[in-house]
Structures are given as C-alpha cells and as structure tokens.
Image (tube, grey):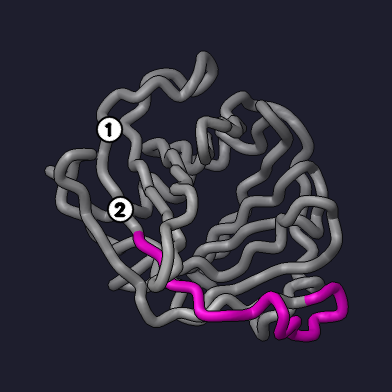
Amino acid sequence: MDVLPYLLGDAVTWPRVGSHAQNQIVDLTRNEVCWVKYGNSRRFECWRWDDQFVYHAVDHGLDGDSNESYMLTNGRWLARYLPAAATASSPWMLDVTQNDLVWFNAACGVDPSRSHAFPYRQRAWFEPRRDAGASLGARDTLVLEYQPYDPQGTAGAAEHYYLGLSTGWYEWERSGFHDFFNRPGGPSTPMDRSVWCKAQ
C-alpha cells in the first residue's frame, strides 16, 4: 500500500490545533511535506519521498525556538509501499545502522559536539478505524515507530507517529506523553524556508 494517502492530509483538514497549533505544507515539486509547529514559521519538520522510501529531511522544530536544527545523513524513515497486512504484531521493519546526526547551530554551522553516529530502528503498521479525536473521528491509521539506539548500549525511548488516512499526521507519542493536533483551526502559518541549513 502506498503510504502517501496517510502521509499527506487533505488541505481542508489543515491547519489544526490540539496540544499546540500545527500546519501542513505540501510541495509536490519537491516531493516534500512539512509541518509548521506552534504557529511559528521558523519551527518545522519536513519529510520527503521517492518511489522507494519516505525520508526524514530536517527537524527545525526544536524546543526553545533556538533556531538550531538537525538532519540525518541516511534519513530513510518509512518504505513508500507497505504490506497491507502489516500489524503491530507483524510490522514492517528497518534497521538504519549507517547514519549520522548532523546538528546545526543558529548560524547554520555544524556543531561537532552534538553531531555523531546515530543508528535507529523503524517499525510501521496499520490500525483500522483508530480514534483520531472527535473532529477527525475513527480513521484508518498508519503508525510509525522510531527508536534511536546506541550499538554499544541501550535503545532510547521509542516515538510513535500517527498518520490518518486523508488527514495526515495527527498525534505523536513518547514515553506515555501524547501530543495532539487533531482539531480544525489555528493559524495557516507559512514556513520560513530561509532558516533551513541544509542546501535545498
């Protein structure tokens, strides 16, 4: 199954609010979807895709509005096509062993103290008719699990991204904390692409 109908929410369902304001911006010429967070045009996360994978392109939505950001050198995030039968007990899986995290300071210089080898594991599955909240209702949902790990140590906390059919990303969870952006409303905040440190 093509994941794009889950990744890209219908424009009529955006922008949204919940735990905070969030807006979706799709650029089909770049094969890119970005989410502008907290009503702040400098704080965003972007993913891109081709025929094989969806890639994590940048996280520029870090806490504190510091204008810092990071990118992953491998960035494979999700297969473009998943088995329709993928479930939580039998998920699609990917172990990205060869990857570096590159951390940019506010001036777009690489911070070597925060840039390092950064392997991670991905799992994904479908949950039919998951409750996405009163506004979005029961939605067929693609769940993406992301877990960084230290090859010589222990895995970090897993993060879960919930992507609803025709609505896109509506919830994020880590260690029992749920972040929602599942109710229509809020500002149609544009994205300030000029602060993106990686060459476009």
What type is the residue that disc 1 sits on?
Glu
At x 82% / y 49%, what residue is drawn?
Answer: 40
The secondary element bearing badge 1 is classed as strand
**Of the numbered discs in the image, which one, if any, rests on residue 11?**
none
Along the line of sight, the residue nearer the viewer: 174 or 19: 174
At 39% across and 82% down in the image, what residue appears?
A: 98
Residue name at image x 15 percent, y 45 percent: 90
Residue 1 coordinates in the image, percent (x, y): 21, 52
Place of residue 163 in the rendered image (x, y in percent of width and height, measured from the top left): 42, 41
SS for dot 2: strand
Q: Of all residues shown, which one is farthest toward the front? A: 153
Q: CA distance from mark 2 to mark 1?
A: 13 Å
Magenta range is 105-121
Q: Which residue is mark 1?
A: 127
Residue at x 53% of width, y 65% of height = 32
Within the magenta stretch, is there residue 113?
A: yes
Q: Which residue is mark 2?
A: 123
Horizontal side, residue 86 vs residue 3: left or right = left
Q: Position of residue 138 (x, y in %)?
A: 37, 20
